[in-house]
Image (cartoon, rainbow, N blue to C red):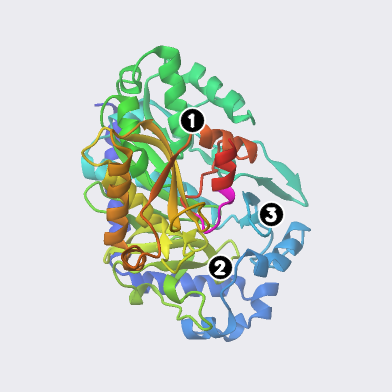
Amino acid sequence: MSIKSVAAKLFASKIYHNTMAWANKPVETQMEVFKSLINGAKDTEFGKDHHFDKIKTIHDFKNYVPVRDYEDLKPYIDKVRLGEKDILWKGKPLYFAKTSGTTSGAKYIPLTKESMPYHIEASRNAILHYIHETGNADFVDGKMIFLQGSPELIEKNGIKLGRLSGIAAHFVPKYLQKNRMPSWETNCIEDWETKINAIVDETIDENMTIISGIPSWVQMYFERLEEKSGKKVGDLFKNFNLFIYGGVNYEPYRAKFENLIGRKVDSIELFPASEGFFAYQDSQKSKGMLLLLNSGVFYEFIKADEFFSENPKRLTIGEVELGVNYVLIISTNAGLWGYNIGDTVQFTSLYPHRVIVSGRIKHYISAFGEHVIGNEVENAMRIAMENTNVRINEFTVAPQINPTEGLPYHEWFVEFENEPENMLTFAEAIDDAMRKQNIYYDDLITGNILQKVVITKVTKNGFQEYMKSQGKLGGQNKIPRLSNNRDIADALIKE
């Protein structure tokens, strides 16, 4: 055992005990964060506009600060972009993370000197919790790859701009610099396909022990490795035993990954976003990710089925329940206030508070009142694939409201790596799993309002071609798991 791995175990033990100290007092921890945020922003333009000097309680905060999305906060962000100080948070942000919006086009999310360290610490602590629980630290001596956006940044009005993953690349700790791959030059390549090929060339002969990224793009990397070497990834990288991912649920990809790797590897799920690093998987034995309650983010939760009502109740960490679908609302030390990030979560445990990402509040299917969410379709796909040889590359779901014949239905667009022996049986397994999870969907099937699931096969690399056509190939971009319209569906049919 190397000195580096021994040191990692000692550090992991310290971080674990520090984490448990705040995780076991969630309400008190969040109140400390809340008071710090209000005090830190009381002299900003936003703080003055919203009477922060009068806010003494969370009840006061709810009265003075409404729930907002990006469009509502944009007038303040526009002032920050022009170089004005003390608008949303004291001073100027260090960075703007540029993300893809929908109605608003590109979104610019501020990152401050107070918020940025938490993004880095969370990634580190996720690995340290894994080391503490498993005792496995040998991988710290090998090479680690993080598939991410370009670290090249531009600067305007004293604020640097880039993708979050590219910004984070500037904060890799010194003790990891020699282990980190790919090279800076390769990481700066903008074209994703060119970049992946360059990464393959750089890493194919290295001792890779940790591989990290969004599953759909790591899959592309694995496929290129196999094409070039003729070997399974696990044979190529004999010491590769830890896959770190975020952005999408890994389960639909797991069978394909294990086939590409040639064996099972441990995995750690992360919940990062430009708006904050919210959670990470702290245990291989427990479902869900530990919600980070001491990381400069004050959380509120609104039940998803009440979100669009006139006055939905805003809950805090002491009021949440297991298994309820909540819209996540945040206020942060980067200057986001009562901000709806669009994600929905469900708690899988309390004390400590762990969550799963259940979907997006705007990504759902309810064309007939069924209220289907992302977590349900992912679970249905996982259940249908159990005990089969079926492997998929990607899938998405859309409603078919006006079929040429018969009843409407949910259409599942699936790119198979290994097709089911009987497509109808596979579709019925998905449909059965959906009906067991969602009573509204079950009622629609039982009442002959909808017919059962219809599967449409997508040609090989069809999803990649779609993303390429949208200018979203690679990086942090991902296919929505489901939508309430047929924009993506119709584009896939044309491919």
In depth, the one of 328 and 85 nearer the eye is: 328
Q: Amino acid at mark 1?
A: Gln
Q: Position of residue 353 (x, y in %)?
A: 31, 64
Residue at 45%, 14% (x, y): give it: 228
What type of secondary structure mainly makes up the magenta span? Answer: loop
Quick check: marks 3 and 1 in contact, CB under 8 Å?
no
Q: 10 Å neighbourhood of mark 1: few (<14), some, or many (≥20)?
A: few
Visible residue check, residue 365? yes
Give, as a single range, the part of the protein colored magenta.
483-488
21 w.r.t. 182: above or below: below
Residue at 28%, 33% (x, y): give it: 421
Residue at 33%, 34% (x, y): give it: 391
Q: How many marks on residues?
A: 3
For mark 1, what is the residue? 177
For mark 3, what is the residue? 105
Q: Amino acid at mark 2?
A: Tyr
Q: Position of residue 231 (x, y in %)?
A: 35, 15
